[in-house]
Image (tube, rainbow, N blue to C red):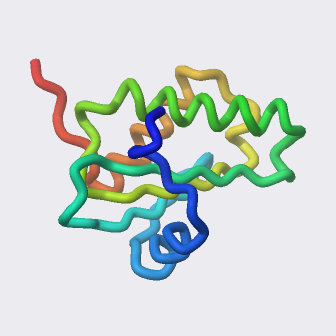
Amino acid sequence: MKKAYRIKKNDDFQSVFRSGKSLANRQFVLYILKKEDQKNFRIGLSVSKKIGNAVKRNQIKRYIRQSFHELHDRVERENDYVIIARKPAGEMDFHSFKKSIEHVLKLGKCLKREKS
C-alpha cells in the first residue's frame, strides 16, 4: 500500500479517535473521520499483542490491507479510517476477514454500491 494511503503519525491517529465516529462488529472497531480536502482515503491499523505473536499480528495487518486493496474502488475517498482488530480476528481466514471488513464499512456507510 502506498504511503499516501497510510496513517502513521500519532497525531493523525489521535485526531481520528477524538473527532471521528466509531462503529464495531465482533472482529473490528472502525473509526471514521471525514476530511473534505483529501484525494484518497488513508488507513491506520492497530493490532494488540493480546491477539497473538508478531507473525499473527502482521498477518492480520496484511489481510486488512489486502481487503482495502480489493475494495479500493468502492471505499469513500475523503475519509481517514483507523481499524482496531479484536481477538476473534486472529482465528479467521482471508475470505471471512474481507467479509467482516465489508460489513463494518457498510455499517459506516463508507462503501459505494457495486456496479453491475
Residue at point 59% right, 29% down? 63
Q: Position of residue 115 (x, y in %)?
A: 11, 24
Side of 82 relative to 34 (left or right): right
Assign the C terminus to one quadrant of the image. top left
Q: Position of residue 59 (x, y in %)?
A: 71, 29
Question: Which residue is nearer to you in this view: 19 or 13?
Answer: 13
Question: Which residue is nearer to you in this view: 42 or 2?
Answer: 2
Please determine whether, in this image, residue 10 is positioned above or below residue 105.
below
Q: Position of residue 68 (x, y in %)?
A: 42, 34
Please determine whether, in this image, residue 42 is positioned above or below residue 96.
below
Q: Image quarter for residue 70? A: top left
Q: Position of residue 82 (x, y in %)?
A: 51, 57
Q: Image quarter for residue 60? A: top right
User: Quick one: which residue is furthest to the front in this view?
Assistant: 3
Please determine whether, in this image, residue 56 is positioned above or below residue 34.
above
Count up the numbered dots: 0
User: Quick one: which residue is furthest to the left in this view?
Assistant: 116
Residue at point 24% right, 57% down? 38
Side of 111 relative to 15 (left or right): left
Residue at point 85% right, 51% down? 49
User: Quick one: which residue is furthest to the bottom in this view?
Assistant: 18
Residue at point 19% right, 65% down? 36
